[in-house]
Amino acid sequence: MTPIAALKVAVVGPTHPYKGGVAAHTTSLAHELAEAGHDVTLVSWSHLYPSKLYPGEQAVPGGAPDVEPFPRTVRALSWARPDTWVRAGRRLRGFDVVVVVHVIPAVVPAHLALLRAAGAGRRATSAALGTRRPGTRRPGPRTVVIAHNVLPHETHLGDRELMQQLFERVDAVLVHSDEQARLAHELHAPRVSVTDLPPHLPGGAPVERTTHDGPPRLLALGMVRDYKGVDLLMEALAQVPGPTLTVAGEMWGSSGERVKELAQDPRLRGRVEVHGGYVPADRLAPLLASHDVLALTYRSATASQNALLGRQHGLPVLASDVGTFGSQVRHGVDGLLVPPNDKDALVEALRRLADRDYTEQLRAAVRPPDLSGPWANYVGTIEALAAVEPAETDDNDTDTRGTDTRGTGTGTAGARASTDVPGSGDHTGGTGPAAVVGHLRHRVSSAVRGLVAASRPEVELGRADLPDWIHPSDILADGHDADEAKAFARSLGLPRCSDGIAAWAALGALAAIVRVRDDGRRSAVIVDESGARSPLSRWARAIGFAPVELELTGHRSSVEVLDVDTASLDVIVRLHPGGCDADDVDEAMSQASWALKSGGLLCTTLPIGPGSAEGALGPADVRAVLARAHDLGFVLVGDLDGDITGRMRQASGTSTRADTAYGLLRLTLRRR
């Protein structure tokens, strides 16, 4: 199977009317996969856990969904009816991929029964596969498990054994932190990919905040469980006069009782309010608007979107430095981070927050999170896991990672290099660049295979190494940003680049490739038309990719020179100083629309300026480019509606010349 067309995808997991972050994520995932052009069915539960496993309320109170329900939802599974697990699985035999959203180990038997009935997974019986070796894939749907928590926060006897059985059957596991990846490998997961949990924020848009002149108001939001550390927060708050606290969420067992007891402490009386019960989506925005700081003082965590929820509503965050909070909160800028289980550190942080001016300073620096880019990364990761068939190897086979046949940069003029571009064929006759490229391919492809197989990345670079401020789509209007990008690239160990603008352009494109199109083996087919002055190809090679680097003359595009087949490339790049302009961006998008695979990326830069500046685009022109991109089947990766549009206007206001560009726009477009 190759990722050249839409996939038929079954997402198996909880959705409305079940409440909570996992149900919201599952529903949002179905929407995002469908938006990317895939044929999606959401297979969910009519009856989930028994009350002994989940003592809280399972359904959303009042019936209002946290996120918009997915239209093609089949509630075919029932905890009490194992026959439904088998029947639902049989209906999935014609699907390309089954994505299982894992919640707790107790549900693993249902998932295993469903996968067996679907003919999916790596572990196959001799009756099903004849002479095929045990441990290899059966010829059914590929299987990807999304593990929000590989093991639960409060583990039970048998949890590890159940998870090991699940991981030994499936093709790939997707987790949201390096620590969870390590745990998945320990439990025999065959292939593990790590990507950030994308935002699936309930509650809608922020509402207007009312003026408050009193002490800072803290909010602890969500189910009260021991690992969330609300009791630690309250114990610390008792030592700091001034700030108030609202605890809003379900009270879970003894942890909830402990919070109620602490609220009666004389030092906290009148300063702490406890509102038990699930907070529905329509109450979230007003609740957040009536507080000043979101408190997430967890003892432990894997991945959480609560810090992003706080940022979306303009609140600074007080969080423990666990899980993903360390990458979501800028300590001392838009929030405070404290070590987990450290009450003294919490006391000190609360004393700082008791200063109203300091809290307002933090709030002024809060920026809303990117709501679209992370989802493009996430969907791209699932597509890569769903589409790449692993080699069938014996247990004694050596590690063959890195043996994918890919292009490598050699040569000088015309086609800088081109080898093994999928679907391009060999050209042994004729003249012109295409014939030259075909001749080169025929002569050096064997040597390139050996070179790539033996190579290893010079720089170890993963998604976690790329901070949130590197956006796939962005505008450069300040030379300081270019210098910062150049310096950061050097700090990563990437090859030197003397041109700060070219470094800024390439850094965003490289981040988009790693986040969206990397399958973990650096096998993406990248065509770089940016020219020798761009560092993109050098940087991509340094981290393990093998881009096809072209330095074109005239008006011929890479897809013409390489004579590639439809939907055969993963990434096409045209960056400063060889980027697009107002005259050729439409042609570049048209060519890329048929040359890129589903989910493939077009990364390009465009000069921004007044109409009198040659080749430059204004804000209205950019909107027209995006409309044309949509018509051609592209989705913008990132958000140009908010901060970027404002920065375009700001840059135009500071420009003193009418004949030159005043900024550079980096656009990353994803093929549906």
Image: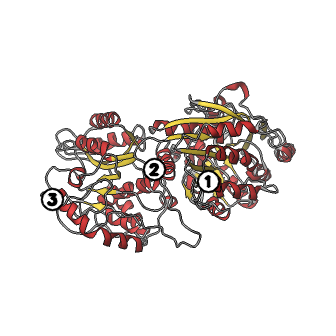
Give the number of the disc on residue 170: 1
Mark 1 residue element: loop
Q: Earlier in the sequence, mark 3 or mark 2?
A: 2
Locate residue 16: give its quadrant: top right
Residue type marked 2: Met
Residue 175 visible in rendering = no
* Distance in Å between CA atoms under marks 3 and 1: 46 Å
Classify 171 as above or below 498: above
Given the image, on which type of amino acid does mark 3 rest? Answer: Gly
Task: Identify the secondary structure beneath mark 2.
Answer: loop
Is 321 rendered above or below residue 74?
A: below
Q: Secondary structure at mark 3?
A: loop
Labelled disc at residue 429: 3
Q: Residue sitting at 29 percent across and 61 percent down?
A: 548
Type of residue at label 1?
Val
Q: Is residue 335 visible?
A: yes
Seen at 66% across and 34% down, the residue is: 287
Mark before the other along the chain sequence, 3 or 1 = 1
